[in-house]
Image (tube, rainbow, N blue to C red):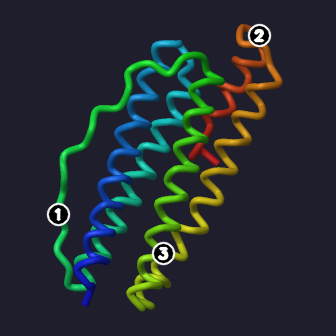
Amino acid sequence: MLSQKMQDALNAQIQAEAYSAWLYLGMAAHAEQLNLRGMAHWLRVQHQEELGHAYKLFDFVHERGGKVALRTLEAPPAEYGTPLQLFEQVYKHEQHVTSLIHKLYETAAAEKDLATQVFLNWFVTEQVEEEASALEIVEKLKMIPEKSGAMFQLDKELGKRGQD
């Protein structure tokens, strides 16, 4: 059984993951407006992953006898700037999510909730991958001029995500 404090923290993380999905869908729309369909595809895949994270937490709360309390999501921004600025925001957001996961883990430790700690290990590892992936794209974008063939090559590369 989850403590009330742990249940509330997990519900807050469900909301954070759902917002992340909504944010990435908004970013995908922005990339589409820039005619960067590969980047838009990458962001849509990210949108789906974030929904999967929310579902994973949703199911865990129920498996532990808790109650899920869904909340209203804030609208994401509509504009994100250049491709570099866009992916810098992706990276910054992933760093934010990592901090939320770490706080959630700390709450589980303080509540002496070993089952939740073990469950959250997957998210801790996932965030290492999420940050590394976003940072790699940021670093590649920093190396290329905005309107060059290299930009379109990177766009093409990002469009292959999930097709490996």
Query: Is 2 drawn above or below residue 126 in the view shown?
Result: below
In the image, what residue occupies the spot 49% across and 54% down? Answer: 97
Find residue 72 and report its horizontal and vertical position in percent: 19, 46
SS state under label 3: helix
Residue wearing tag 3: 105
**Is 115 on the left-hand or right-hand side of 138?**
left
Residue on which the image places disc 1: 69
Under circle 2, the secondary element is: loop
Q: Find numbered disc 1 in the image and state the secondary structure of the residue it sits on.
A: loop
* Occupied quadrant, residue 39: top right
Residue 70 found in image quarter? bottom left
Q: Earlier in the sequence, mark 2 or mark 3?
A: 3
User: In this figure, which residue is indicated by the disc labeled 2?
Assistant: 148
Residue density around tag 3, few if under 14, some if 14–19, many if 20 or more, within 10 Å: many
Q: Is residue 164 left or right of residue 46?
A: right
Q: Is residue 91 above or below residue 119?
A: above
Disc 1 residue crowd, few under 14, some 14–19, many 20+, Cα 10 Å: few
